[in-house]
Image (spheres, rainbow, N blue to C red):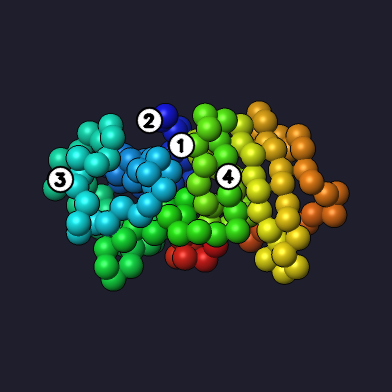
């Protein structure tokens, strides 16, 4: 399993995440990306999470904290479906990491931001939510180096202003 790097910021959405919540989120994201499936909080085992260094109690507390902070989303069956920027459910936004792994991103902006989450170059295949036009993009060293059309526009809203940003992408 490849480790991803996420820098905890003193401002923004990650300022509210504790180190234990960060560890749980990191392991859950890697689980979804590596296994291409949701992690079920009720039926899956913490042993399924490679490299996690938390007790079962710490993990449960971390997931509860992430839910309360609305940083991840879990359905009524216990499936953890959304862990910004990763979606365990299919979307129109597929990110392929430099290490060869791929996953669905929650939205186009999240797909682009995945380069920072995973600290890797990425390739994105997406579709416009308005017209269905296929879009492809490569980001290397934090810069867009290839794009399928010059007629692509990005509309961005500051997600820090939304309390429930995991559900608003």
Q: Earlier in the sequence, mark 2 or mark 3?
A: 2
Residue 95, numbered label: 4
Q: Are marks 3 and 1 in contact (CB under 8 Å)?
A: no
Badge 3 vs badge 4, beta-carbon distance below 8 Å: no
Residue that label 1 marks: 6
Picture residue at 45% right of the left edge, 59% below the top: 89
| Mark earlier in primary sequence (3, 1) | 1
SS of the residue under disc 1: loop
Query: In this image, 136 relative to 79: left or right?
Result: right
Q: Quadrant of residue 145?
A: top right
Provide the secondary structure element on which disc 4 rests. strand
SS class of the residue under badge 3? helix
Q: Kindly report the distance in space between the C-alpha atoms of the residues bearing marks 2 and 4.
A: 17 Å
Give whichever of discs 3 and 4 has the lower sequence position.
Answer: 3
Q: Nearer the viewer, mark 1 or mark 2?
A: 2
The disc, 2 or 4, on the residue closer to the chain's N-terminal end is: 2
Q: Is residue 7 visible?
A: no
* Residue ID for mark 2: 1
Q: Position of residue 43 (x, y in %)?
A: 20, 56
The numbered mark, 1 or 2, whose residue comes first in the sequence reads 2
Q: Position of residue 66 (x, y in %)?
A: 33, 55
Q: Which residue is mark 3?
A: 56
- Closest to the camera, between mark 3 and mark 1, is 3
Q: CA distance from mark 3 to mark 4?
A: 31 Å
């Amino acid at each position: 399993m490849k480790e991803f790097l996420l820098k905890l910021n003193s401002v923004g959405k990650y300022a509210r995440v504790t180190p234990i919540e960060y560890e749980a989120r990191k392991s859950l994201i890697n689980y979804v990306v590596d296994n291409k499936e949701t992690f079920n909080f009720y039926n899956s085992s913490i042993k399924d999470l490679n490299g996690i260094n938390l007790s079962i109690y710490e993990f449960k507390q971390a997931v509860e904290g992430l839910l309360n902070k609305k940083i991840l989303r879990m359905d009524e069956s216990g499936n953890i479906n959304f862990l910004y920027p990763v979606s365990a459910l299919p979307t129109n936004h597929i990110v392929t990491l430099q290490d060869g792994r791929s996953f669905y991103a929650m939205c186009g902006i999240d797909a682009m931001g995945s380069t920072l989450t995973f600290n890797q170059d990425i390739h994105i295949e997406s579709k416009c939510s308005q017209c269905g036009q296929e879009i492809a993009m490569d980001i290397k060293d934090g810069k867009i180096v290839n794009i399928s059309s010059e007629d692509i526009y990005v509309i961005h809203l500051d997600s820090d202003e939304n309390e429930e940003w995991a559900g608003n992408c």
